[in-house]
Image: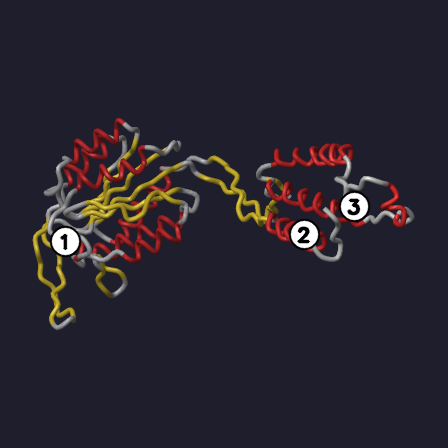
Amino acid sequence: MTFLHPWFLSLLLLLPLLAWLKGRRGQPPAFLYSSVQLVRAVLNVTRSSSGGLLTALRWLALALFIVALAQPRLLRSETRISASGVDIVVALDMSGSMASEDFEVGNGRVSRIEMAKTVLKKFIDKRPNDRIGLVVFASQAYIAAPPTLDHDFLLQQIDRLELGRIDPNQTAIGSALVAAVNRLRELKSKSRIVILMTDGENNAGKIAPLTAAEAARALGVRVYTIGVGMQGKAPMPVFFGGRKVGYQWEPVDIDEDTLTKIAAATGAKYYRADNAEKFQAIYAEIDGLEKSEAEIKKFTQFQELFPWLISPGLGLLLVEVALRHTLLRRLP
């Protein structure tokens, strides 16, 4: 058991002093009289001890309230975790071209966005002790999750991602990179990285990607960039009546030159993910590059005990007041 405010316990030392001072002052007279003859009939009456009982109840209630102020608590669990000291923000492209199904998994095709979500979730599972955040972008950039150790929440946010939730017609790579770097700026970790995944080129936003890369370098943030999907033409699914009826091959253009310069400017690396196996290997390589062990201690789950003191204290106080005004009433 511990106390959140242990200095309140020092007030307990004042209780004996207050009781002594109250005793020296004596009890107030029950009534005043001008002649002993008036009370001769009650001279042999035994002095009642009820006053001492009432006083004891009040002092005990006061002692319970003081201990409650110190906020006693039981430590229910103590967890040691080994944290890597790496903070990560992933910037994920949500533009319309991410619907292209140019990844083959098993006997079927998978869209770029679904493939990116799958490998990202596996990456998160491998790094349970890292704070990881998520930025999504298309024509604008948004924070989907701040850097957090609550990976269940983070995975839920990834599952909720759907194309079309934000304007999918353009790609604001520079804005996304700035949003990701800003999430890491105030964190005092050993290593801070951004993983930027996109299948296009910057054609929206007010910040140029290379300008954002310079800001990242100034803050000591490494930016790993990943070009998602094949170059040239990609199979876009065609739907009719809510069902996929085929594919339409549309031109795509990944700005590999800019992505390479972003990574190089920040001391990181550019990767090209044009098939499922390579996509997973890229994240495995990043996982191996960004390691830095540092053990920390994490305490959780306290049980507060002060309600168990306040309740009996109030009960004793109510009993004392009730007795003082009923069974043990005395003359004022």
Residue that extends furthest to the top in the rendered view of this protein: 218
Q: Position of residue 80 (x, y in %)?
A: 54, 42
Secondary element type, mark 2 = helix
Q: Give the class, few, some or many, for how many residues have Cα within 10 Å of label 3's Cα (few <14, many ≥20).
A: few
Q: Position of residue 49 (x, y in %)?
A: 82, 48
Residue 63, image quadrant: top right
Q: Residue, x 25% and y 57% (percent of image)? A: 114
The dot on residue 276 is: none
Residue position for label 3: 52
Question: 17 and 221: which one is in front?
Answer: 17
Residue position for label 1: 97
Q: CA distance from mark 3 to mark 1?
A: 85 Å
Apparent side of residue 282 relative to residue 125 in the rendered image (left or right): left
Circle nearer the N terminus (3, 2): 3
Q: Amino acid at mark 3?
A: Gly
Q: Position of residue 213 (x, y in %)?
A: 21, 32
Q: Give the class, few, some or many, for how many residues have Cα within 10 Å of label 2's Cα (few <14, many ≥20).
A: some
The label nearer to you, 1 versus 2, is 2
The dot on residue 321 is: 2
Secondary element type, mark 3 = helix
Q: Give the class, few, some or many, for how many residues have Cα within 10 Å of label 1's Cα (few <14, many ≥20).
A: many
